[in-house]
Image (spheres, rainbow, N blue to C red):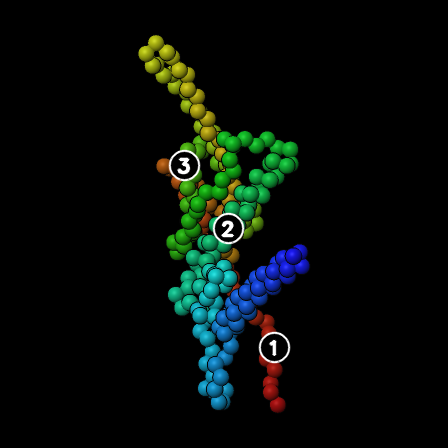
């Protein structure tokens, strides 16, 4: 009796393994068919799968999402640079967060480190940089040029107090908002370091950088006659 039960259990296990193996082989064959070249006479008659079909399927989605657009004729490299900049900003914020948390510096929920958005324009005779930093005090904004780097940093501190009367009760409300920011911008070679002006209005910092004349290097090459 025990032998029969053991035999039945073994058969069930073998059947489950057989079904699982068959399903795996079928799935593997299905994926391989995507990459296989259709059989026909002569190499010139062979058809290769298109890029979009080759990268189809669930396990190709991540790859195609990241690298597929580079093969599209409508691919915009500037948008990709913006995405990369946003990713770098996120990594930078997370790095600052770790440094403050594990480096022994104070870190509170109402003391965030943020990276404001900026816009750079070429106006012909000068460059214009605009940075959105609302709620700032002009005296807390630092703008400096080091080499070919434009560095903008600052600290925002806002505090409001309010007394609220509700019937026979008096409530006292105090709100605080703190934040620090830092941006470093690599300037073009023709950006001058003199005559730079900065103006802060309506939450927008505008920095004007005059261009300077860049002398083209004079080639002192020697002409060699061909014999």
Q: CA distance from mark 2 to mark 3?
A: 23 Å
| 143 versus 44 height, above or below | above
N-terminal-most mark, 2 or 1: 2
Query: In which quarter of the view is residue 175 placed?
Result: top left
Secondary element under disc 1, as helix, strand or loop, is loop
Q: Residue at x 38, y 12 (%)?
A: 170
**Camera-nearest residue between 175 and 168:** 168
Image position of 39 (left or right of 102): left
**Camera-nearest residue between 16 and 9:** 9
Q: CA distance from mark 3 to mark 1?
A: 58 Å
Q: Is residue 138 visible?
A: yes
| 62 versus 222 height, above or below | above
In the picture as drawn, the residue positioned furthest to the top comes out as: 168
In the image, residue 10 lies at what x, y percent? 63, 61
Q: How many marks?
A: 3
Q: Work out which quarter of the rendered image holds the N terminus and state it.
A: bottom right
In the image, residue 118 lies at what x, y percent? 43, 47
Front of the two marks 2 and 3: 2
Whether label 2 touches label 3, CB < 8 Å? no
**Camera-nearest residue between 164 and 156:** 164
Residue 134 is tagged as 3
Quickly name the residue at label 1. Answer: 222
Residue 87 is tagged as 2
Secondary element under disc 3, as helix, strand or loop, is loop
């Amino acid at each position: 009796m025990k032998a029969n039960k053991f035999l039945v259990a073994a058969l069930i296990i073998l059947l489950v393994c057989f079904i699982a193996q068959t399903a795996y082989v079928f799935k593997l064959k299905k994926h391989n068919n995507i990459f296989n070249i259709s059989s026909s006479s002569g190499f010139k008659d062979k058809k290769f799968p298109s890029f979009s079909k080759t990268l189809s399927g669930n396990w190709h989605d991540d790859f195609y999402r990241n690298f597929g657009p580079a093969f599209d004729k409508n691919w915009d490299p500037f948008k990709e640079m913006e995405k990369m900049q946003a990713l770098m900003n996120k990594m930078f914020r997370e790095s600052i967060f770790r440094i403050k948390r594990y480096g022994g510096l104070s870190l509170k929920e109402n003391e965030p480190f943020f990276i404001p958005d900026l816009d750079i324009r070429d106006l012909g005779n000068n460059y214009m940089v605009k940075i959105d930093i609302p709620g700032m005090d002009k005296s807390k904004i630092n703008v400096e040029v080091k080499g070919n780097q434009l560095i903008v940093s600052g600290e925002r501190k806002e505090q409001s107090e309010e007394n609220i009367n509700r019937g026979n009760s008096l409530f006292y409300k105090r709100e605080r908002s703190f934040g620090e920011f830092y941006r470093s911008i690599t300037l073009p070679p023709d950006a001058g370091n003199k005559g730079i002006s900065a103006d802060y209005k309506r939450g927008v910092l505008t920095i004007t950088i005059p261009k300077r004349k860049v002398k083209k290097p004079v080639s002192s090459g020697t002409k060699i006659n061909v014999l």
